[in-house]
Image (tube, grey):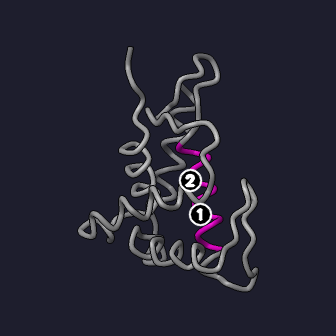
Amino acid sequence: MRLLIYALLVLVALGAGDAQAETIGSLVRKCDRLLQVGQFEGETVRFPGDDPEAVMCLGYMTAVIEFVLLNDADTKKPLLGICAPTGLGMPQALQVFINHARARPESWHESAPLGIMRSFSTAFPCRSG
């Protein structure tokens, strides 16, 4: 339970802040850039290190995805009800987020972590039973 509270606080902190907070729309643009310049080989992503948009997308997506896919240490159940498949790679994760966001341009002003979480919960819901 303590981990869940901590995780929610992290999510709120990522989504809150000043005018510099990352929005869904701004992250979509940065991730489009990563898809353009990146070379994806399994879990490895290669791209020009001097491309700030690609760097920002990869860092942001990696951090939020790690959080979104957390499992409870005791029960091993996903904390946020997201059951992503084993072997989910960054190219697929990027497309899940980008496709979800493009289908909902009315949400582009909202926080990027919330957008990533929504896209993953839509694409990878846990099945009960």
Is 56 in the magenta? yes
What residue would you read off at disc 1?
60
Q: Which quadrant holds the C terminus?
A: top left
* Element type where label 1 sits in the image: helix
Q: Is residue 125 left or right of residue 62?
A: left
- The residue lying at 69 percent from left, 64 percent from top is 40
Q: Residue furthest top?
A: 129
Q: Is residue 82 left or right of residue 102?
A: right
Mark 2 crowd level (few <14, some 14–19, many ≥20, 10 Å Cα) = some
Q: Is residue 2 left or right of residue 109?
A: right
* Element type where label 2 sits in the image: helix
| Residue 57: quadrant of the picture | bottom right
**Span highlighted in magenta in the image:** 55-68
Kindly report the distance in space between the C-alpha atoms of the residues bearing marks 2 and 1.
Answer: 6 Å
- The residue lying at 51 percent from left, 75 percent from top is 32
Residue 19, percent from left and from top: 43, 77
Q: What's the residue type where badge 1 is placed?
A: Tyr
Query: Residue 64 — which label?
Result: 2
